């Protein structure tokens, strides 16, 4: 117990996995809980502009540098009529929203969200309803959003005060259609047929859009991975991405196993890639299918409290997980999983962004603050842009109650050739043992360490609240670099961002 172990890593600019698509630092805002109402939108709040959007929230979203945000759901989209959310606000219907059993006032809809996205410096990733609806509503929404004018739906948009088309590029063909909880749940054959016909109609309206077909809701779904194989068999030629969703929780309070969960995530990604490539071979196709990991995060803290929420209220505090320090470590680890498969994972959306299982929290009428998971996301989003490199790693390993041979060191490396920077992300996931890491960076001549940022805390369960935010990074990481040998000390259970720059 409490030993200091040794690990080694070798990094070379030629060990390239692939260019990082910045959209892996995407996020998600659903009409759910206080994500929209009381989150991004709170008219009357002292930080809100005339349009009702909170500037303090926009500023925090900008800190995370989120390039794309999925909208409007989630489970909610499977019962959503997009027409309810456009046109004069006072004429919009208030509807029962069945997925989360709340009242949806429709004060924010497509145009308002697109405006918010512009202000937050991000793109919209739009999901269409394939639960209760199909190709007709989907193609009309593409026409409304993307057609310049001169047709019924594009002119309708113009009449709603939005002259320029939104030009939304990335569209999701429904949400979690494999899940029995989903409104309009389907078998893989039913979904595959519907998805391919919807895709064709949407691309006829705007051939420049990209489409994401629904994969499995998580790795434990009984239909995984047959669902992916069947769905792609129908849709392979028409879609560009297949989705993955995964949430984790430390439900049995076994932190050692919890911090090893990304071993499952790596396996999930590898299996979906294998399934895509199987269909590619079956179809003798030259096209490569990419992955959109468009829902991922920790989600479990709020599950009990949510059971007590009164149905049919507007924006109740649903899914308001208060994240602790160990959650932040796991979030860093999940982000590194994407970087290690940067060749195939092109989109990923942290679910979600504000209040609902989110890095950013707000108090209605009060301030906003950063949850623990804000920090690893911000680090990887800011410094993980460039080419993902494959480090060669030697690390001690150990067993937990749930997993065997868990590598103590979890890592990913990004080289930005234009900016001449090299960033090493590293997690020492052992709960007791430190790690002295020796890194061979001889391939990076004239590079020097410019910062070694650390997220650590002696209490795995420490949380950030409105009143007090003890979990935050510092720049006192211990590392030295001489003659191409970088030595870094990684205390137990700690997250590291070691940044080098050509001098
Ligand atoms: O992000 C919360 C919910 O999780 C989404 O609505 C749904 O797609 C998933 O099950």
Image: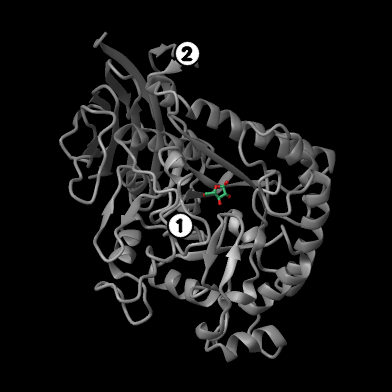
Quadrant in the rendering for residue 446: top left
Task: Give coordinates of residue 146: x percent, y percent.
Answer: 63, 76
- Which numbered dot is residue 33? 1
The disc, 1 or 2, on the residue closer to the chain's N-terminal end is 1
Protein image colouring? one colour
The residue that mark 2 highlights is 405
Quadrant in the rendering for residue 440: top left
Query: Separation of disc 1 and disc 2 at Cα?
Result: 40 Å
Q: Which quadrant holds the N terminus?
A: top left
Q: Is residue 450 at all visible to an observer of this figure?
A: no
Quadrant in the rendering for residue 441: top left
**For this rendering, which residue is in front, 223 or 59?**
223
Query: Does the residue at mark 1 contact the one at mark 2 (Cβ under 8 Å)?
Result: no
Task: Give coordinates of residue 231: x percent, y percent.
Answer: 77, 46
Q: Nearer the viewer, mark 1 or mark 2?
A: 1
Q: Residue at x 44, y 23 (%)?
A: 252
Drawn side of residue 27 relative to residue 281, left or right: left
Q: Is residue 219 above or below residue 233?
A: above
- Which numbered dot is residue 170? none
Q: Residue at x 73, y 68 (%)?
A: 202
**For this rendering, which residue is in front, 457 or 278?**
457
* Secondary structure of residue under mark 1: loop
Q: Residue at x 43, y 72 (%)?
A: 116
Task: Give coordinates of residue 246: x percent, y percent.
Answer: 55, 39
Q: Is residue 362 at all visible to an observer of this figure?
A: yes
Drawn side of residue 128 relative to residue 56, left or right: right
Drawn side of residue 196 relative to residue 323, left or right: right
Task: Give coordinates of residue 226: x percent, y percent.
Answer: 76, 35
């Amino acid at each position: 117990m409490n030993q200091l172990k040794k690990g080694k890593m070798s990094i070379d600019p030629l060990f390239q996995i692939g260019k990082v698509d910045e959209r892996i630092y995407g996020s998600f805002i659903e009409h759910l809980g206080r994500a929209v109402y009381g989150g991004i939108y709170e008219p009357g709040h002292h930080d809100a502009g005339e349009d009702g959007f909170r500037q303090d929230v926009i500023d925090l979203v900008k800190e995370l540098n989120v390039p794309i945000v999925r909208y409007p759901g989630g489970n909610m989209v499977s019962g959503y009529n997009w027409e309810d959310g456009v046109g004069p606000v006072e004429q919009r219907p208030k509807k029962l929203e069945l997925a989360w059993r709340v009242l949806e006032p429709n004060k924010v809809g497509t145009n308002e969200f697109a405006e918010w996205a512009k202000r937050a410096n991000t793109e919209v990733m739009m999901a269409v309803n394939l639960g209760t609806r199909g190709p007709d509503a989907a193609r009309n929404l593409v026409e409304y959003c993307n057609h310049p004018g001169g047709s019924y739906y594009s002119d309708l948009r113009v009449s709603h005060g939005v002259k320029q088309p939104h030009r939304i590029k990335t569209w999701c063909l429904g949400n979690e259609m494999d899940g029995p909880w989903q409104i309009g749940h389907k078998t893989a054959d039913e979904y595959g047929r519907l998805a391919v016909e919807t895709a064709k109609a949407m691309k006829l309206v705007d051939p420049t859009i990209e489409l994401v077909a629904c994969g499995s809701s998580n790795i434990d779904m009984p239909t995984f991975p047959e669902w992916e194989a069947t769905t792609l068999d129908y849709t392979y030629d028409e879609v560009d991405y297949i989705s993955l969703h995964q949430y984790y929780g430390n439900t049995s309070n076994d932190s050692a196993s919890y911090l090893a969960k990304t071993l499952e995530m790596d396996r999930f990604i590898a299996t979906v890639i294998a399934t895509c490539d199987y269909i590619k071979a079956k179809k003798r196709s030259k096209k490569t299918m990419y992955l959109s990991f468009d829902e991922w995060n920790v989600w479990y803290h709020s599950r009990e409290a949510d059971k007590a929420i009164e149905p049919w209220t507007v924006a109740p505090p649903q899914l308001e997980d208060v994240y602790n320090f160990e959650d932040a470590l796991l979030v860093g680890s999940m982000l590194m999983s994407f970087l290690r498969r940067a060749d195939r994972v092109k989109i990923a959306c942290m679910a979600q962004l504000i209040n609902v299982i989110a890095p950013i929290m707000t108090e209605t009428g009060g301030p906003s603050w950063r949850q623990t998971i804000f920090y690893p996301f911000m680090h990887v989003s800011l410094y993980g842009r460039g080419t993902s490199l494959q480090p060669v790693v030697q690390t001690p390993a150990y067993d937990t109650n749930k997993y065997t041979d868990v590598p103590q060191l979890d890592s990913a490396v990004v080289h930005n050739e234009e900016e001449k920077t090299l960033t090493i992300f590293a997690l020492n996931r052992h709960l007791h043992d430190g790690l002295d890491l020796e890194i061979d960076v001889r391939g990076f001549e004239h590079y020097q360490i410019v910062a070694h940022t650390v997220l650590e805390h002696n209490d795995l369960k420490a949380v950030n609240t409105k009143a007090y935010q003890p979990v935050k990074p510092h720049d006192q990481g211990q590392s030295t670099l001489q003659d191409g040998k970088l030595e870094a000390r990684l205390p137990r259970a700690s997250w590291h961002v070691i940044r080098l720059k050509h001098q």
